[in-house]
Amino acid sequence: MKRWRMGLPALTLGVVLGSGFVLAQQPLARICSDASKAPFCSGVRGDRSEGWLQQTRSEVMARNGMVSTVQPLAAQAGLRILQQGGNAIDAAVATAAMLNVTFPQNVGIGGDLFALIYVAKEKKVYQLNASGILPAGLTLERMQSLGYKADPKNFGPGSGMPGGGILTVTVPGSLWGWQEALTRFGTKNFKEVLQPAIEYADQGFPITEEIASLWRMKNALPLQACCTQQDPDSIKTFYVNGRQPPAGTIFRNPDLAKAFRLIQQQGRDAFYKGEIARAIVAKSQALGGPMTLEDLANYKGEWVTPASNTYHGEFTVYTTRAPSQAWGIVEALNVLEACVPTWYPGQTLASLGPANAQYWHALIEAKKAVYRDVYAHNADPNAVNVPLDMLTSKAHANSLCSCRVGIGDHRAGLRIHPAQPWRPVHAGSEEPERDRWQ
């Protein structure tokens, strides 16, 4: 089983179940790009009566619980579940479902899920990996026969892969993970936590300004030499009269509401083995994709131990482990803790401070070290060995400090291919990569 972390697909996978598509009305809101601008467009950033004037929003305070999202209705859905007696897991699933409605290009049942869950009574952090896996029929030979081959000039993840389209679509894990988290740690079921999202998918909601700017459908066709055209079904589902909906549009998605109702009745089997599964496979096959009913029926995520380490002995930092790239955060903190005193004797990040260019220079060099390891090693640990314990260890971070000779004199490190060993920069060697601080 291979898990690929690719970009979000620009295709409709699980919502085209009926004959109806999105219904909408013309937006009533005026935005700053209109010819007749709304009064707030002339406001001053950070124009506050008190407190920190550069802060554009007041802090939120609460006694019993809090939900934070990019979309207010999604936060409201999670809060509604908390007020009904649900716990954080129940609220998280309700929030994710509402984001599927209100911010579909970011969250959805056709996507992936990584979750870190802290159980206070156990004082333990759990990780759920419900990331997408490769359809069995998407082999290296098939990709190469379609003209997709690794590009040595772009050695990063997904080298040679198309920028979108059906070939980048993995078997979705998100919904499997929602039910798994609810079953193990939640107190409510799909009938309860999906209801707020169903109501808004049916009745509609106004697309907010920030999300409207991101509501763009990527090109997804053709199969070979992708991607120069948009997928018509996706346009019918997410656009209005063939156009990107502007802020203020009342957007409805009755087919997504239908999908959620099926999941309320049948659980995740509706998605992986039932009507939704058949719709996904039909769409995939129509575009030349490799996904099968067996791929969906056989999907299974896993509970794993998160990556973690301490920072300056004061904090324990937890992140998701491979195939997620987030474990790089642990390595980066290790590098900064170990190497900043070597790079800048007598200094810490705190003493340098963000007004000092060396502060940012250290962050940049630490990230280079981390991404070199991420590019070289990150993969599906069920398919290849990912030496994560070594990469997130203090010893490994210490070994990287001397590999960046020259950082103290503001010279940027070399751009190093993942296959190349680390080596210091010496006088007379090849020209180092320059960064913005040089």
Image: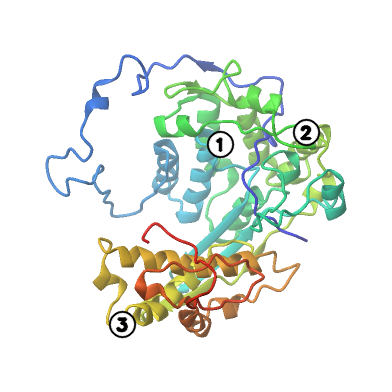
The residue that appears at 87% across and 46% down in the rendered structure is 145
Q: Are marks 2 and 3 in contact (CB under 8 Å)?
A: no
Which marked residue is nearer to the observer: mark 2 or mark 3?
3
Residue, x 39% and y 57% (percent of image)?
436
Say which of 193 and 169 sits in front. 169
Q: Is residue 378 above or below residue 20?
A: below
Label 2 – label 3 distance at C-alpha: 59 Å
Contact between marks 3 and 1 (CB within 8 A): the answer is no
Q: Residue 208 at what x, y percent from top left? A: 41, 30
Mark linked to residue 345: 3
Mark 3: secondary structure: loop
Q: Give the mark nearer the N terminus: 3 vs 1.
A: 1
The local crowd at label 1, few if under 14, some if 14 to 19, many if 20 or more residues have their Cα within 10 Å, is: some
| Residue 254, placed above or below residue 320 | above
Q: Is residue 163 above or below residue 370?
A: above
User: Most extreme residue toward the front, as rendered?
Assistant: 428
On residue 104, the disc is 1
Residue 371, image quadrant: bottom right
> In the image, residue 184 lies at what x, y percent?
59, 61
- The colour scheme applied to this rendered structure is rainbow
